[in-house]
């Protein structure tokens, strides 16, 4: 594990408590039976890669009510309506925050969004235990996020292997060069570069630009956080980055899907 920022430490500590509580309510074996009965996942990575390889914008549109850095972002919050709006606006995939204590999310939000549209969905949460991977599949997620800063290398390997075995795709998230090296040890097509510094909450798109050269052919970059303008999108596209994960900018707009279409249409160069 790299130097863990305070907020991440707090979130991780809470996640361990949540997992212990959840295990008392339902065993992992019981959850596995539910996971095994799920229909095949929707192909999160494929939906992105098809677009990226054609130099088309591949947008993961995020459903996020609140965050530790910004507090409440959107009062008028209906996951089903937001998913429909994003599908209409041209999203490739959805991201739904399921963490309750720090993001005011819920597992039900993810299921409501997924049921409303045909788009693949990533369960956006902080994975620290195999229980959560099984739980994600049981809840109907198509992909999970693994944050390198939150895991030891062995845990990262194990959770990744488990997710793939369950039919889930994985987005591996990094913030710096050391984490990128750790991420690249795994055979995984999607690498998320998060532009948000979790120590200070500062956001700099330079994080993506600085780490880009480390990414070998065959891996696909998703730039995460801090995309607000058509110029931001154009700057990424100029560096051959076509994968985007965007939350706040859409969530603050009256019609998030319309905002998506506007931001990414204008930016096509
Ligand atoms: O958003 C936060 O404040 C935050 C704090 C601590 C850990 C993670 C955090 N955000 C999760 C995300 O990765 C973003 O929701 C996602 O990249 C979208 O970012 P944005 O477009 O800036 O909302």
Image (spheres, rainbow, N blue to C red):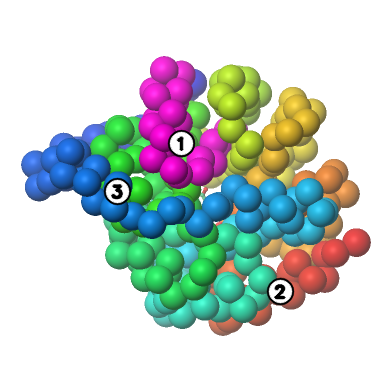
Residue sitting at x 49%, y 73%: 117
Q: Sequence order check: which comes first, mark 1 or mark 2?
A: 1
**Label annotation for residue 35:** 3
> Is 184 included in the stretch rendered in magenta?
no
Which is more foreground, mark 2 or mark 3?
3
Residue sitting at x 77%, y 37%: 209
Instruction: Measure the alpha-carbon separation of dots 1 and 2.
Output: 32 Å
Magenta region, residue range: 152-175
Residue holding disc 2: 261
Q: Residues within 10 Å of mark 2 (few under 14, many from 20)?
A: some
Q: Position of residue 30 (x, y in %)?
A: 16, 44
Q: Sequence order check: which comes first, mark 2 or mark 3?
A: 3
Residue sitting at x 79%, y 64%: 230
Instruction: Measure the alpha-carbon separation of dots 2 and 3.
Output: 34 Å
Residue 96 shown left or right of residue 17 in the figure: right
Q: Residues within 10 Å of mark 3 (few under 14, many from 20)?
A: many
Which is more foreground, mark 1 or mark 2?
1
**Label annotation for residue 164:** 1
Quadrant placement of the C terminus:
bottom right
Q: Residues within 10 Å of mark 1 (few under 14, many from 20)?
A: some
Tell me the SS state at disc 2.
Answer: helix
> Is 167 included in the stretch rendered in magenta?
yes
């Amino acid at each position: 594990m790299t130097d863990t920022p305070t907020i991440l430490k707090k979130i991780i500590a809470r996640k361990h408590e949540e997992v212990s509580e959840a295990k008392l309510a339902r065993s992992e074996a019981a959850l596995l039976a539910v996971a095994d009965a799920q229909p095949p996942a929707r192909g999160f990575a494929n939906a992105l890669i098809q677009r990226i390889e054609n130099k088309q914008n591949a947008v993961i549109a995020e459903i996020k009510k609140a965050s530790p850095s910004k507090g409440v972002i959107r009062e008028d919050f209906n996951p089903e309506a937001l998913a429909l709006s994003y599908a209409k606006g041209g999203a490739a995939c959805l991201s739904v925050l399921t963490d309750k204590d720090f993001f005011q999310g819920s597992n039900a939000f993810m299921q409501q969004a997924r049921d409303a549209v045909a788009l693949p969905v990533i369960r956006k949460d902080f994975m620290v235990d195999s229980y959560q991977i099984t739980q994600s599949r049981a809840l109907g997620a198509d992909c999970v996020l693994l944050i390198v800063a939150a895991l030891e290398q062995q845990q990262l390997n194990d959770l990744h292997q488990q997710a793939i075995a369950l039919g889930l795709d994985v987005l591996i998230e990094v913030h710096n060069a050391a984490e990128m090296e750790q991420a690249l040890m795994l055979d995984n097509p999607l690498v998320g570069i998060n532009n948000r510094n979790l120590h200070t909450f500062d956001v700099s798109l330079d994080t993506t630009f600085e780490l880009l050269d480390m990414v070998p052919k065959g891996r696909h970059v998703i730039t995460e956080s801090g995309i607000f303008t058509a110029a931001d999108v154009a700057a990424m596209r100029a560096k051959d980055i076509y994968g985007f994960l965007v939350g706040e900018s859409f969530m603050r707009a009256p019609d998030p899907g319309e905002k998506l279409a506007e931001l990414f249409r204008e930016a096509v160069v």
